[in-house]
Amino acid sequence: MIVGIANIVLVLFIIATAITAVRVRELLSSVFILGAFSFFLAVLWALLGAVDVSFTEAMVGAGASTIFLLFALYGCRHTVNEEIWNKQRWLALGLISALGLLFIWGSLDLPWLGDAFSPPNAYLSPYYLQNCIKDMATPNAVTAVVVDYRGFDTLIESTVIFTAGVACLLVIRNKK
């Protein structure tokens, strides 16, 4: 019950920070609000049991992205064109709202959290638990899933994060 309430509160914080990040006028405030947005997402992922996704969101979203955006902001102009700002603000708010509704619509077919009869819980989890030692010689089921069964996926995720970091460093380095 408490976890369900915490999830609802976190989702409300996530929605509030997303709307605030679009509506705020100062870029510096927007960077910090986006950092808070990523932090709330990381906490939500942790409560939902996706600790690897939570850790990645905390490190990349709340940590590295905030630092890179601050460095990028250091080289930007700090004036705002009011006419362009008003048009872009409503466009961005409309696009975020449409994207949010699309995500909600797309998630309606997903099984409920903790549903024992959902396909992942009914077929995949028992398979991994019963066969991880035989298939991969890994006694820890979590390690077997993340490293052995999903090794290529984890490698590609790491490559994407590394490439994004190198690209940000190259952009920051060329500021003269």
Image: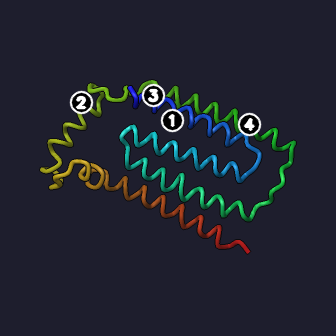
- Which amino acid type corresponds to the residue marked 2 in the rendered image? Ala
- Which amino acid type corresponds to the residue marked 1 in the rendered image? Leu
Location of residue 116 (image quadrant): top left
Where does residue 22 sit, x and y in percent of width and height?
70, 41
Mark earlier in primary sequence (3, 2): 3
Farthest left residue in view: 134
Q: Which mark is residue 5?
A: 3
Name the quadrant of the C terminus. bottom right
From mark 3 to mark 2, how far is it between C-alphas?
A: 27 Å
Tag 4 secondary structure: helix
Q: Is the Cβ of the residue at disc 4 closer than 8 Å to that at disc 2?
A: no
Read off the residue under disc 4.
91
Which of discs 2 and 1 lies nearer the camera? The answer is: 1
Seen in the picture, residue 34 relative to 97 is either above or below; the reply is below
Q: Is the Cβ of the residue at disc 3 closer than 8 Å to that at disc 4?
A: no
Read off the residue under disc 1.
10
Q: Is the Cβ of the residue at disc 3 closer than 8 Å to that at disc 1?
A: no
From mark 2 to mark 1, how far is it between C-alphas?
A: 29 Å
Read off the residue under disc 2.
122
- Which amino acid type corresponds to the residue marked 4 in the rendered image? Leu
Tag 3: Cα neighbours inside 10 Å, few (<14), some, or many (≥20)?
Answer: few
From mark 4 to mark 1, how far is it between C-alphas?
A: 25 Å
Is 92 left or right of 106, judged from the image as shown? right
Which of discs 4 and 1 lies nearer the camera? The answer is: 1
Farthest bottom residue in view: 176
Is 127 left or right of 20, judged from the image as shown? left
Tag 3 secondary structure: helix
Q: Residue at the spot x=57%, y=44% of the render?
A: 37
Mark earlier in primary sequence (3, 1): 3
Where does residue 57 sit, x and y in percent of width and height?
48, 50
Mark earlier in primary sequence (3, 4): 3
